[in-house]
């Protein structure tokens, strides 16, 4: 694999919020990849896949959403950050920063969990040639594995309620392994996750400006049977938010990738190169995995 240069970069969202990312660059890049994180994941969680893609011939940008990691807030509880801000402002600004860093290269996105859900909030989505979704599915508890119900009830109404009362934010304690979350991010996430329609009522009401009904770049989504959150049903629910896009769904067992488990976050850990190769072929050439991709209406 080619040598990869990594550089920390700073840029601003349209509303002036300062954001921080890492730019990975290999030799003779042919594509520019924006990696958008899942909820509570700092950008460096994606360093292995970012470096692998860069070595294959990409310029890759990972970044922290506002309130997370190096894009944090001095007073998270009073920051006013809401969930869709990560798509409306931060994902949009990150794509612009990537375009400036890789002029002339095709722009594609790789979204993990909420990083795929929020593509429809990007004001500049039309610049993207292709999207890869990994472990992207609706947050509605009813389409998750049933064994997760006690944990989700505890998170939404036990730990979450206590954390907001005690600290005014969601702290990384009590079983929550992600970064601290702003209160409105949690409240919006919880409201959506209590209904099968999830985000759709807020989109229909135009609670925030969005472009879900305009996104036309093709999407391929990968899910894994041992992921109790992004189940195939949950993935289809999310893909239905993008009516104009050509969509495909790939279900990959861990054994097919040569590993013992994937879960909700394991696709980005070391040793998942078999999956990353499929992502690379899709993002660069639009090549779907043989015998595994099902068209979604």
Image: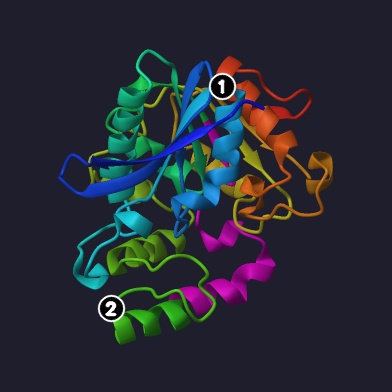
* Left or right side of 115 for 233: right
Is residue 5 visible to the viewer in this orientation of the structure? Answer: yes
Q: How far apart are marks 1 and 2 (CA)?
A: 44 Å
Say if mark 1 contacts mark 2, CB within 8 Å: no
Q: Residue 57 carries which label?
A: 1
- Pointer 2: residues within 10 angstroms few (<14), some, or many (20+)? some
Q: What stretch is highlighted in magenta?
A: 132-156
Q: Quadrant of the N terminus?
A: top right
Q: Which residue is drawn at 49% across and 40% down?
A: 111
- Local secondary structure at mark 1: helix
In this orientation, which residue lies closer to the viewer: 22 or 5?
5
Name the residue located 30 percent from the left edge and 69 percent from the top edge: 183
Q: Position of residue 239 (x, y in %)?
A: 51, 37
Q: Mark 2 points at which residue?
A: 168
Q: Is residue 45 magenta?
A: no
| Residue 168 in the image: above or below residue 11 | below
Q: Is residue 235 above or below residue 290?
A: below
- Kindly give the residue lying farthest to the top in the view shown: 104
Q: State which quadrant residue 290 falls in.
A: top right
Q: Which residue is drawn at 49% across and 75% down?
A: 155
Earlier along the polypeptide chain: callout 1 or callout 2? Answer: 1
One can see residue 137 in this view:
no
Q: Where is residue 106 in the image (x, y as percent from the top left)?
A: 44, 17
């Amino acid at each position: 694999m080619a040598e990869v240069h990594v550089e920390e970069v700073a840029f601003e969202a349209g509303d002036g919020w300062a954001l921080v990312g890492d730019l990975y660059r290999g030799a003779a890049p042919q594509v520019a990849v924006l990696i958008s994180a899942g909820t509570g994941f700092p950008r460096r969680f994606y360093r292995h896949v970012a470096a692998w893609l860069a070595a294959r011939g990409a310029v890759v940008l990972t970044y922290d959403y506002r309130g997370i990691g190096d894009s944090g807030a001095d007073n998270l509880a009073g920051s006013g950050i809401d969930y869709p801000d990560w798509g409306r402002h931060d994902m949009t600004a990150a794509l612009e920063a990537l375009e400036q860093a890789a002029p002339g290269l095709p722009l594609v996105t790789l979204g993990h969990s909420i990083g795929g859900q929020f593509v429809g909030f990007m004001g500049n989505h039309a610049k993207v040639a292709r999207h890869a979704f990994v472990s992207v599915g609706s947050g509605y508890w009813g389409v998750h594995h049933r064994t997760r119900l006690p944990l989700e009830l505890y998170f939404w109404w036990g730990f979450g309620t206590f954390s907001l009362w005690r600290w005014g934010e969601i702290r990384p304690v009590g079983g929550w392994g992600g970064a601290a979350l702003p209160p409105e991010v949690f409240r919006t996430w919880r409201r959506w996750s209590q209904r099968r329609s999830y985000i759709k009522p807020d989109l229909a009401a135009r609670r925030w400006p969005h472009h879900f009904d305009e996104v036309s770049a093709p999407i391929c989504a990968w899910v894994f049977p041992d992921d109790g959150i992004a189940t195939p049903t949950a993935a289809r629910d999310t893909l239905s938010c993008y009516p104009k896009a050509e969509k495909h769904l790939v279900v990959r067992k861990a054994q097919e990738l040569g590993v013992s488990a994937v879960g909700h976050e394991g696709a980005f850990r070391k040793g998942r190169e078999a999956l990353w190769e499929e992502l690379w072929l899709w993002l660069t050439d639009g090549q779907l995995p043989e015998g595994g991709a099902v068209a979604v209406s």
